[in-house]
Amino acid sequence: MTKKKAAVINVALIAALLIALYIMEQILPPTAMVFTVLKKGAIYALVAVSMNLLNGFTGLFSLGQAGFMLLGAYTYGILTIPVEQREFVYQYFDGGIVKFTVPVVVALIAAGAVAAVFAYLIGLPVLRLKSDYLAIATLGFAEIIRAVFQWDKLGPLTNGSNLLRSYPTFQSVLYPFIVSGICIAIIVMLINSTYGRAFKAIRDDEVAAEAMGINLAHHKRMAFIISSFFAGVSGALLAMYQTTIQASMFKSAMTYEILLIVVIGGIGSVTGSCISSFLFIIFSEWILRFLDNDTYIGSFHVPLLRSGFRKVVFSVIIMVIVLFFRKGIMGTREFSVQGICNFFTGKSRKKKAVKGGDSND
Amino acid sequence: MTENVLKVENVTMQFGGVLAVDNMNIEVNKGEIISLIGPNGAGKTTAFNVITGVYAPTNGAVYFNGKKIIENHPQGKMKKLYQGENNGKYSSVLAPTPDKITKLGIARTFQNIRLFKSQTAFENILIAKHLRRTSNLFTATFHLNGKEEAQMREEAEELLRILGLEDVRDELATSLPYGKQRRLEIARALATKPELLLLDEPAAGMNPQETDELTAFIARIRDEFGLTIFMIEHHMDLVMEISDRIYVLDFGKPIAAGTPDEIQNNPRVIEAYLGGSVDE
């Protein structure tokens, strides 16, 4: 199968997926659970891929994702709340200090840009750290930024600890799919470029990468900024999905969820992250919901099932995965049409699957 | 006299109380194969690490093609060790990172092989081509640099072919036999288009036959790529056969320099290092 043919099939699959989603929307009621899963899954797929770019492809173990999502969400909200609504939203702060709105697309890009600018500034000190220390520093950043955004003195901008709302949101499930899809496609193209190869070199061996002329500081910063940019965009999408923004949403638990997705999908696999983000959302939002509810069978109160038990189950799952399935679903392989064809025709699957095509999201 | 490609001037490297390299002077001329030998722990790899910018030297300077690339002349206690042109006056510290040194045209291999282990042989070479890119992040991401990318790939293929690695092109670097891993490391270094190639024990762990092959191989790449080669090596057969000149280090101090014949007959070298093996 030629490269061109594979590309045509990929495009056809993406088109078929979008059409299927469109048809589903026409048939099913908009409140159906499947739409929640698809919308949230698409958003989480983007942030998981952005985290994978950093943790999986560049080897920088960062846990600041929730912080960058928060920045993106707030930027989006602040820039898009209609002027006439601001009085009501910022009711304790005289309508806030921002007195204009920008189009949704501009706000989405601005959301990424603000996250990227913060990433640059945070990166100056923290990217000198390695492995666990970097993780702790970025986690600390995410927590600090969450606290700062709830600070009363910043109220005219962030509305303090009150909700941001009334900004434009999306109804159609196609929206997050298309935006996430474009962003993920850009990340995949980056990974397949010469810069992506340099990132992988840094992951494999920093000393050798530097000896081969790769400027470590420059490339690490680049990966950190790009990853944060897309985390910011996904934060904005999440804000659109949730219809309200509150800083307390972006807890470190959110970062752990994303990390869980990345690990389940396979550290170093874009398609793995996409697949596992949908799986994760299906389980956490849908199938395993019952774990959080008090359940009675007849008059028998089922033990353990109560609010918060779901988290316990997830913790156990991540432990099992880390201990026994360290490679996740995909390992570092990519899911591709070519890979599947080779699998069925029995051609040297190992090599081709590693090389893989673009993601199918 | 031919031009110095590399000149190491009064380089001293001190780690706490340990003088790893003590006032070392080396000159490497264009097209030469120079060896650096010495017993274990003599400071050979440290010397390489200073030249390639991994460590900033405690004192001294390194010149590449007549241009000063590394320099540190401290004041105080270490000052008296320096007898170069700036003796006595403090000058600015020049401590480029290894990637900048590589960019200037000095490539190296490692004593313990350091290939990119999750990548194939081909990708390993391709990664080294990143250095000479002209594309920026934007053009590379959106694949607007097709011409350059194609050229990079072609050059990488050619290197594989010249170095006899085309049959393992798509194998993971770590799954290659040991000799080929060494060869791939050299190929990867060559991909950065160096003028000066630093080989850190290229024959480590090789049997006599493989060492013979490597000897011919090193001479061949020198001629084919117009390189100057500076290497650390323990296999005396290899060193004596292909070196134009040899430097001997012992406890960080250079104790002798000269042609293979001179070195073999130098009593200090025999005492310090070669022992009985010179009689072979």
Image (cartoon, coloured by chain):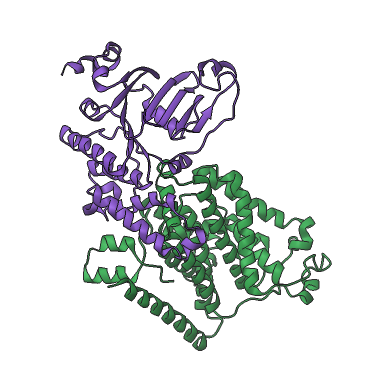
Residue drawn at x 23%, y 27% is B235
In this view, A177 is above or below B258? below
Quadrant of the image containing the C terminus of chain B: top left
Residue at the spot 37% in from the left edge and 46% down from the top edge: B193
Task: Specify whether residue A125 is in view.
Answer: yes
Residue B30: x %, y % from top left: 35, 34
Q: Is residue B82 left or right of residue A164?
A: left
The quadrant in which the N terminus of chain B is found is: top left
Is residue B89 depicted above or below A261 in this figure? above
Can the viewer see residue A329?
A: no
In depth, the one of B2 and A95 nearer the eye is B2
Residue at the extreme bottom of the image, as rendered: A27
Residue A213 image offset from top left, x and y in percent = 44, 45
| Apparent side of residue A10 relative to residue A61 in the rendered image (left or right) | left
Taking depth in this image into account, of A236 and A27 the one nearest to the observer is: A236
Q: Which chain is purple?
A: B
Chain A as rendered: colour = green
> Residue B2 location, x and y as percent?
37, 30
